[in-house]
Amino acid sequence: MTPSNPLIAPVLPRVTERLAVRPLGLADVGLTRGFWADWQRLNRDVTIPHALHWLERDGSVDNLRDVAAGAPSAHRGMWFSDSDVYKMLEGLSWDLGRGPTAQLSDAAAALIDVVRRAQEDDGYVNSFVQAGHGQRWEHMATSHELYCIGHLIQAAVAHHRATGGGDLLAVAQRAADCAVREFGDHRRKDTDGHPIIEMALVELYRETGRRSYLDLAQQFIDVRGYRALDPGGHFDSAYFQDETPVRQQTTVVGHAVRALYLLSGVVDIYLETGEQALLDSAVRQWESMTATKTYLNGAVGSRFDGESFGDEYELPQDLVYGETCATIAAIMLSWRLLLATGQSRFADSIERALFNLFAASTSVERNAFFYNNPAHRRVARPAAPGDGRPQRAEAPGTRPPWFQCACCPPNIVRTIASLGAYLATYAETGVQIHQYAPATISTGAGIGLVMETDYPLDGTVDVRVAQTNGERWTLSLRVPAWCRGATVSVNGTTAPAAADERGYVSVTREWRAGDTVSLVMPMPVRLTLPHPAADAVRGTVAIERGPIVYCLESPDQPDGVDLNRVELLVDEPLVEERRELLGGTVPVVHVEALARDDTAWAGSGWATLGEEPPLVGRRVTLTAIPYHLWANRGPSVMRIFAPARRG
């Protein structure tokens, strides 16, 4: 079973025998309506023009133009701002793969021309260094030179796959060849302080077949943990994933985005080389991260200091960093692990990330963004003016239109543009559906499916066979870990949905056009407890429904309620209600709570046990909304977890 079209997808392993499932592309899976299709439309119509405007306004494109003109001026913005241009090119390319337009094609062509003219004859390109603000390859821990080249390569691969055009691919190959000449065959023992070059080089190898790119990616993995970098300054080797060799590492450490980009490259190299130790390390670190270092909303990276992972269960709600790019990186890693193993737990992780933190990263208008993502905001006052990166997770309270360090918005653009590639896969045995949204799926070999659902508004997913080849094959549907009591029916005949060891319910038969499989997943509202070792949230509960994490936000609460002084009455029933909110129908949840009056504690922050003031408060009904909708109505108080009270 092989797709009939050339695949347009971010991850296309060249060696397939180690794939449990194989990717489909943007020409094979199309989102047709609903939350994600609407976002893809707004991504094209709103976010991309908005982002292109800001890249011009903040000087990111002009930095490259100045170099191309041979008259470099003072470099504007971050020293790695070239990478934002490349991520936008990648996003433009994936969107062109969904359906070309003259406007997108012209925008991509203009940026490609700027980059091509900025590149030096030997392939080197970096506007900061070329403008005279540094020396080539001199400060690898911090320079981001290979990081920028990595994003250039990813953009070029996307553009080549989506359009067939070779101009940007030629630029990327010249840059990669420059890196091979400088670093290859261990001519240098160091690497870049910010990973991404590893998975980029693997994907360039997959696109071109040039072994030198895979070999250099492997070299960059191999040197990690042997003090390949001189950290200097404030950060240590762990921040750079350079304290412990990759194959020996047991948990994610240091800068969250860097760690997860590195592990994505680790899995890519395993898929091409078969080195089991690499996969084992990636799975081991993913398991540790998911169990001990991931927030309920899919955030990773608990510390502002170093944008880094903290210790196990170090999960402060109001001081979490939770960078949007880190959750996108976690999605990238989980997708590769899903391809390698076929296990639903990796698709579950992607679902949690997409519907919660990632969905919250952008305003409902899709033209403003969160860089870091709090799980608790204590104050409703507006943040002080700044660049959107204040040193506290409660700020800024609303989403800025852009950032001085603009890595997150173009990362969102490229993720949304390529989202169809993460919905379904195929294997010799049949088709696997991992994420649920209205979509058409074509897997080649005469097989076509139509998926209809209002998920996650409700838990019914209908998959109709639109075309089949008459052969016997298997349709597999993920049963999420949160789901209890799922049922499946084929043409109206219902049976319990017993998931297999990988977490999927499978139906095998000789299919006919018109056959319909319906998966029904009950979605009662539920209360979720944190791990008892998570000190910051011990004794609290959160509200979830299906894949959606809920929060309490001040605009929805009765007058006079301070969300920092409420306790949820967990023995009382939770009541679900459908409400029109921020342009859509949303299930909100009403929960009974005690609104405390702590006046008796005035002047004292503690009391001897047995002598504490009596608990005083009033019973109120609070309303919880999906977390991803918070902060769209002005600065507010918000929390995901709240203290639980019984009786």
Image (tube, rainbow, N blue to C red):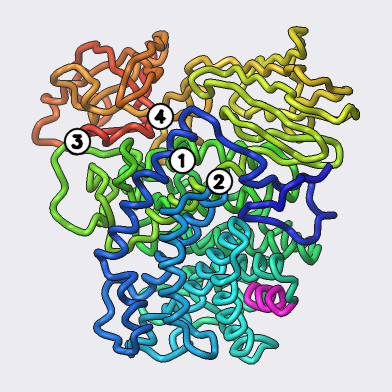
Specify which label sits upstream in the sequence, 1 or 3.
Answer: 1
Q: Amino acid at mark 4?
A: Gly
User: Percent x, y for residue 461?
Assistant: 62, 20
Q: Are marks 1 and 2 in contact (CB under 8 Å)?
A: yes
Q: Nearer the viewer, mark 2 or mark 3?
A: 2
- Tell me the residue that label 1 is attached to: 40
Image check: 520 left or right of 122? right
**Alpha carbons under labels 2 and 4: distance apart:** 47 Å
Q: Earlier in the sequence, mark 2 or mark 4?
A: 2
- Of the image marks 1 and 2, the number of the one nearer the N terminus: 1
Badge 2 marks a residue whose secondary structure is: helix
Name which residue lies at 72% across and 77% down.
215
Segment tinted magenta in the rendering: 211-221
Residue 131 placement (x, y as % from top left) = 33, 86
Q: Name the side, left or right, on which 326 lies relative to 11.
A: left
* Numbered disc in front, either 2 or 4: 2
Q: Which residue is mark 4?
A: 539
Which badge, 1 or 4, is on the more N-terminal residue? 1
Residue drawn at x 50%, y 39% is 354
Q: CA distance from mark 1 to mark 2?
A: 10 Å
Residue matched to label 3: 634
Local packing at callout 2 (Cα closer than 10 Å; few below 14, some 14-19, many 20+) is many
